[in-house]
Structures are given as structure tokens and as C-alpha cells.
Image (tube, grey):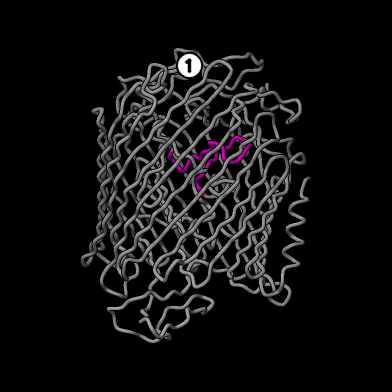
Amino acid sequence: MRLALSTYLLLLLLWMPVKLWAQVDQTSIDSVAIDRTLLEKITLSDVSTSRDEDTAPADSAKPLIKVIPWEFRSPIGAEVTATDSTLRWQIWPDWTYKLNREPGVVSYRMGTSIRSNAVQRYAHEPRHQELYWEGIPLNDPVSGMLNWSLIPQHKISTVYGEDLGTHYRTTYYLTQYYLNKPLSRLIYSESKFSSRNLEFEVSHNLSQKTNIELRYWDRREGGEYDNSEVKGRQIFAKASHHLDDRHLLKLNYVNNKLDVGRPFGYITGALRTFNFDRFETVPREGSGNSTEINNLLALNFYRRSADSTLATDNLHGSLYYRSTQRMLQRTADSTSYNISSLGLTTRKWWSAGLLDMEGGITYEYFLNREQHPAGVLATGNWGLLEAEAKTSVHPASFVTLRVDGALKTRSDGFSGHRLNGVLDFDIGKFALTAGLSSGSLMPTPQQLYWRSGAFSGNPGLSNEDIQEGRAQLTYHFTPGTRLGIRVQHKDITNGLMVDASSISNNLDNFKPGPTIGADSIFINVNSYASQSAAAFFDWDAPHFEFNGSATLHQFTNPTFAPDQAIPMSAQQRFWIKAGAYWKGYLFDRATYVKAGLSGMLTPFRYQADHYNPELDYWLPVSSDQRLPAFNRLDLDISARVRSIMFVMRWQNILDDVSQPGYFETAGYPMSQRKFLFGVRALFRN
């Protein structure tokens, strides 16, 4: 186990002067005094202070006002699923490792983090999930899939989740700094094989109104099996400027580049007898690889109420430029596309008595940079317009009615819509939520216009129609303790899939070249239903945290055609998860420690979703083998000493004890037992 570098870092941090260890570790809210020459001067004692009561020095030549840190408005109906204060205590190789522990989630990982890993979220397949950075959509413009590795996860302030019925939407906001002193942060983690991550960040106030940030993240993962390495970077830059107490401007830039080894699965034979010998395991494509480059430049405008007691804004607007490039090479073929887009989005919130409203509109124009006969996307440029409206009514103190709808239209003549209604009841310690939705989803440009040696799009596809219902009942014993159950049913008509007659990771013998026939085409499949049920509990006490869940997912017959054959496996997927942690101060309050175990078990075999590397697409229709039953247990330890945090994990500690290894996706063995070490250091000077 190569941990030499982490050892040196640990010794260096212990050697640091005590003054550095005494610096504060909180970055989310710090005081700042903003110059105002036209407003009434107030005393320094009225200036907002940070949690460590650090204040800016008074300037007798310049009047000061109280600064109210900016609070970004959450989408109506969304719930907080993660915050900076919960994320900092764990080490997540990529976002799917965090989602893997949540109720209602069945993960599809491919053994190496920051790949195109995906999750099934309640009844929502990976292709029915959306990712937004504030109001800007981040899903791939060609395939429509989302890539969790695009998230600047160490910059997260708040993550919101919305079940919109036809799909599930994740929206994240990043930390907004208010500084009196320059801030710098170092984050390092490493593990076995090629796993190394180094990230540094600097932030500085150019003036009392203007802050700039720069962050660089070097990412390396994999290396356990042949052709499994992933190398990449993430560059993030931001400049924010308070125009006055009601208006904020931000300029954001993020660049992601990943060079990904693409083995196209491994030759495993029967999954139940696979020996997980990384030296003898052969990839189907020994030199397959992809290069993926994503850029986003956005100018954002925010406005809040003239009422100085309201810190939360009510208007967002963004002008943004995106570019998405993907180049894949394999023995028999290579494919690439390069899409740029210019977009404008705005979102407004209103409140009037018992009524809350939210409206948004987004227009994005896409440029196909590879319009030539050899290009894989047989279409020109296109435009996409989306309008969305939400309303929330509170007819009584214990009842909330929410209705939302959306319309989408694309310049190639396709359009889609969504209508969703939800009732929330809060009676004492009980909370009941029930919802119904209906919608129609457009085929993606990939499904319509793709052309390569192995796959072709189908311009004759019809929209995918969805009818959905869900309910959740929760009982709160205390503010930090809850017990609940959630069920969801989705009927999908004209589901959009690849013809799966030859898609398989079932090959026992390796043959160079494509494993998928050149006549594979996107089609509308028979109607089917996706069902999910989850039971869960959480208990957060002063010194202990316990959580657990049981998740059941199944594809089955649609409600309106109970005897119709469905195109995918109907086997149930059953996951049991649990976690137990202790937390508290040690060594005379010199350090705060959180330590515990988190594990999961799936006792029955099932067929997981299939990943197609050429299309970068997940779908449930395939002839893949069923996964053997498996379990996983992780030991997590984190310790904070003022501005230094150590984060450690013994991952999959029962590997080669209760089982020789396991799969979450057929053909991609998961990583063996290994130790992850991370350190996060924050400095102000």
C-alpha cells in the first residue's frame, strides 16, 4: 500500500506552528463591510459577524453597512439532500458513492470512480434524471445522460432534490464566500493503485464588494484492472460582485477534462465463479479509451427584496456558454462529437398571502461543430426552448397543494410536456405526501440522428409517454429522528431504448472487434412499468447517528396492460443498507471525531442496467448475466483539529472474507478492499 506521500503530509501538518492550527475552519459565512457613500452610516457593532466573531476593521473615511450574506432561493417543492456541513465528514471518490448510501437508490458503478457511473433513484432510471447548476442544465446535449463527475463536489453549499414525477432533478449551489482575509485550502487523498487526488483553492477579496476564487483539482483513479485508469482535471474560477444590497453578479467558469480507459467490460465467464484476479482478467478492449471535455462559462445575476430583513433572493438570470466534446476510440471504430451552445435562463419567485409561485424560461441554441459526412450526428444546429411554472398553496396550516408544469419544444419539430400535482399533509409528528404526474419526453438527438458502424438513430421515433404516482409517509419521533416508507409507480409507453437483441456482457470468449451488430437501432419498446418501495429511518442524537433502509425496485407490467410482456428482466432488486456512527470531542476538546460503519446487502440475484461505452448510455434492456448476491462494509473515520480535517475510509473491509468480490454492473468487477486517506487544510492569512 503506497502511502508515503500521505505520511509526509501528516508529519508536515503536525509540525506546523500552533498559530496555523488555531485558524478557523468555517468558510460559509464571514463578515465583510461593503462601501456605501449614499447610505446612512452605522456603527461597527452592527456589522454582521461570522461564527468565529471575526469582524472587518472600521474605516473612519468610509461609511459601513450591515452585510446580509446572500441566500439563494430553493426550488418550490425541493428538499435539501446534502449540505457542506454533512459532506465535509466523508470522503466521496465521486458523487455516486454518496448516493449509494441513500434510501431508494440502487447504484450502477463500474469499479472505478469518476467514470460514467449511474444510479436508479426510486422508480427513475438513469435516463430520467436531470442535473442543474442553479438554473443551468448540465445533462449531455447529445445523449441526455448526466455525468456526476462534473460536480465541483468540494465546493458544494447545498444540494436540492425534486421528484417531478416524470423524472428526478438534482440542483446544486456552491459556497459563497464573505472574507476578511485571503483564504487558501488544500485537499489531498490517495489510495491503492492509481488513486490520487490533489486540489487547491485560493480566494481573495479585491475590494469590500468583490471576491474572486480559483480552484484546480487533479484527479486520478483506477489502475486495479487493465485499462481501468482515469486521469483528469477540474478547473473552477469565480468572480462575484455586490452591486448593492439587493443585487449580485457572479461570473463562473468550470472546465472538466477526463481521459478514461474504456475496457468495454471484462471477460468474466460466469459471474458467480469469477475469481477477481486482477492480473488474469482481460478487458474486451485493451486500448479502448475516451476523452471528454466539458466547459461552462456563465454570467449570473441575482436580485432580492428591498426588505432588508429578507436575505433570500427572488430572481435569477444567467447567460451561459457550454461546450461538450467526447472522443472514443476502440479496435473496430472511433466516434466523436463536439457540441457548443449559447443559453439564456431566468427564474422568478413570488409570494402573495397563502400562495407561492415560481416561473422559469430557458432557451439554448446548440451548434454541431462536426457537420460532415463522417460525423456521428447526422443533424445540423438546433434550438431548445423550455418554460416551467410552479405554484404552492397553503389552504390550511397542515395542508399544502403544489402544482407544476413544463413545456419543451425543439427546432426539429419535437416537443414534450409535464404536469405534476402534489399534496402535503403535516399533522403533528406525521407527514404524508402524495403525488400524480403525466408527461411526454422527446427523443434525444442521439436517439434520432446517431450514425456509426455499430449504431444508428431512428428519426421515426415517437415520444415516450409517462404516467406516475407516488406516496410517502413519515413519522418524526424527534426533530432528528424519523421513520418512513415511500412507494412509486411509473407507467412508460413507447420507451426509448436500443434494440437489445445483441447487447450483452455475457461473452465467455474474447473476440476483437465490435460485440454489437452494426444494425443496432433505437426503437420504441413495449410498454412497461417501473416500481419502487423503500422503508427508512434516521436517528441523529448528540453523540450517535443511526440510519437504515430497505429498497425494492422492479420492472413489471404497466397498469393498463397487466398481461403484456415487458422488454427487460422483471427480477426484483432488493438492497438493505445501514450505518452507525459515534461523534464527539476527544483529548480535552482538542479534536472532534466522527467514526462508524456503513454497509449494504443484496441477498438475491438480479440483472443490473447495461452500460454502452460508445453511446455513453445506460439502459435496462439487455441480455447481461444476473449479478450474484453481494455485500459491502466500510469503516469511516474523520477527525477535525481546528482548520485541519483528516478523513479516512477502509473500503469493502469484508472483501475476500464473506465473498471473493462483487459486481454492481455485469462485466465490471468492483474494487477490492483498500484504504483511502484524505486531508483537508484551510488557511487564512
Vertical comparison of 589 with 241: above or below: below
Q: Quadrant of residue 15?
A: bottom right
Q: Residues within 10 Å of mark 1 (few under 14, many from 20)?
A: some
Q: Position of residue 661 (x, y in %)?
A: 71, 36
Considering the image in quadrants, where does the N terminus appear?
top right
Question: x, y (%) of residue 627?
Answer: 61, 31
Observer-nearest of 612 and 243:
243
Q: Amino acid at mark 1?
A: Ala
* Magenta region, main secondary structure: loop
Q: Position of residue 269 (x, y in %)?
A: 68, 21
Task: Residue 412: name its quadrant.
Answer: top left
Does residue 52 show up? Answer: yes
Q: Residue at x 30, y 68 (%)?
A: 246
Highlighted magenta segment, given as a residue range: 103-124
Residue 146 to residue 381: above or below: below
For the residue pair 246 and 571, the one nearer the viewer reads as 246
Q: Residue furthest left?
A: 352
Q: Quadrant of the C terminus?
A: bottom right
Mark 1 — residue? 454
Residue 275, horizontal then vertical, whole percent:
74, 29
Image point 43% across, 46% down: which residue?
487
- Looking at the rendered structure, the number of numbered marks drawn on it comes to 1
Above/below status of 421 relative to 29: above
Q: Is-magenta flag for residue 604?
A: no
Residue at 58% x, 14% y: name it. Answer: 513
**In front: 638, or 150?**
150
Q: Secondary structure at mark 1?
A: loop
Q: Work out which residue is located at the far front of the displayed protein and give it.
A: 61
